[in-house]
Image (spheres, helix red, strand yellow):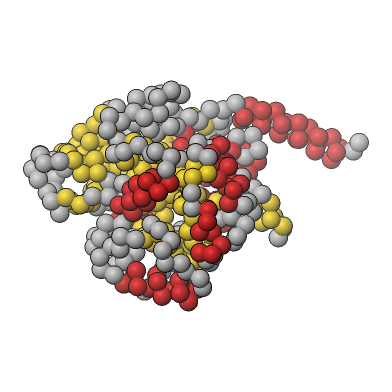
Amino acid sequence: MNKITYATVYLFIAYLIFGLLISRHDITVTEPKINKQQQSYLYDYNGAINISSNLSTGTGSLIEIFDAAEKSNLNFVVTTDVNTFSEKNANYNNYHNQVLAIVNSEFSFLDTKLQYITKKNDTPINNLGQASAVISEHLSSPTPKDDAFIIWSHPTKKGNKWTGEIPIGLDGLEIINLKALWQDSWLNKKITFIWSFLIYPFNPELAFLRLFQRAEKEIKLWEDLNKDRLRIAVAGSDAESRFNFFKSPLKFPSYETLFKIVSNHILIRSELTGNYQKDQPKIFNALKKGQFYLSLDMIGDPIGFMFYLKTSKKNKFMGSTSNFQKNSKLIIQLPKQVKVPIKVKVYKDNTEQASLTEQNNSFKISGPGVYRAVVYTKISLPFPEGRKWFPWIFTNAIKVK
């Protein structure tokens, strides 16, 4: 063998040895626990939103997606195949083993894409013209509609930004989108992307964590929209299990991998029963109200987290609007099993108000505004990167008038 061949073999062996070491690197920030429900009166259920099957841009069937969700310990999924219509997917709205499926669509609308999620499929959409009319009516309504909500997909992605004034009827937007995350990294941080690509076969969670950014542009947009009406912040998996490599699609990364990275955790008062007709409205209403938080589950089980406004009359949860009362406090409770340093940053109108470090935190609010919190954790990355702070949990907002 010539020198080039020897060098290639040595590099490959070194890569495998490094990969073996990387595969053992633990980035989780919580200890395992048996009891999954830590709250005294709220149940925490997690799910993935914005998923595409082979009905549109994805590579897996809906049944394969539901199976992957169950393997990833999700409680629900909201699929949004691009420009698909009711007759193709309505029959899948049901429980599939332990996973509740809400099957809807994402539609091209003007220069962007919108997820249209309905409570019931009583009004089927059968073509793009009908979809455009239904969405236009929803977006123009000054009061939120009870039967559906609309989410703006990857709102800061090039070629997908809104042209003109954003309508009052828009219900929410993705402040996290996994596909946009790695695409942005490829465009702007190629060395970081390539290094994560090499790490991925050995430790997918670590590979994605290295790419994760703090979504400043998306959060700024979300905060601006909250000035006239409180909007929902969503973590979009944008799961397709598809990577175009030299124009040939690969089933990569898998649905199961993507479902383990980030999810939306709803907090509801009554337990899910396994009956679709009873449980689907519970999940739908919690999502529509913004009564949930966003979590990078790949770095830790967040169950036990709470964020609410305590007033003299009653508690107000995420997605709520409340009148200002003196001595009102934000309560931020962290999971008990956290094993690394934590800090909770409290924001009012996108301006940091406090950085808290206790397991149970109380913060007295100063007056009207839009309040939210972000939980950061300190994670040790492999040599040569060292320890870094990463966001773990993003709350939806509470508006105080």
Residue in the picture at 31% in, 46% down:
291
**Lateral position of residue 110 relative to residue 186, left or right:** left
Viewport quadrant of the C terminus: bottom left
Kindly identify the residue that appears in the image at 34 percent across and 61 percent down: 147
Q: Position of residue 91 (x, y in %)?
A: 52, 56
Residue 49 in percent (x, y) is at: 46, 51
Label tally? 0
Which quadrant, please, contains the N terminus?
A: top right
Is residue 350 among what the camera can see? yes
Identify which residue, 370 or 343, lies in the foreground. 370
Which residue occupies the foreground of this view, 278 or 307? 278
| Relative horizontal placement of residue 60, taking residue 105 as reference (left or right) | right
Judging depth in this view, the residue of 156 and 332 nearest the camera is 332
Q: Residue at x 33, y 40 (%)?
A: 267
Q: Is residue 180 above or below residue 358?
A: below
Q: Residue furthest left?
A: 326
Specify the farthest residue to the right. Answer: 1
Residue shown at 43% from the left, 46% from the top: 276
- The image quadrant of residue 265 is top left
Image quadrant of residue 229? bottom left
Looking at the picture, how far across and down is residue 28, in whole percent?
48, 29
Decide if residue 209 is in sight here. Answer: no
Q: Position of residue 121 (x, y in %)?
A: 43, 61
Where 94 sits versus 341, above or below?
Answer: below
Q: Is the residue 270 above or below the residue 108 in the image? A: above
Q: Nearer the viewer, residue 39 or 242?
A: 39
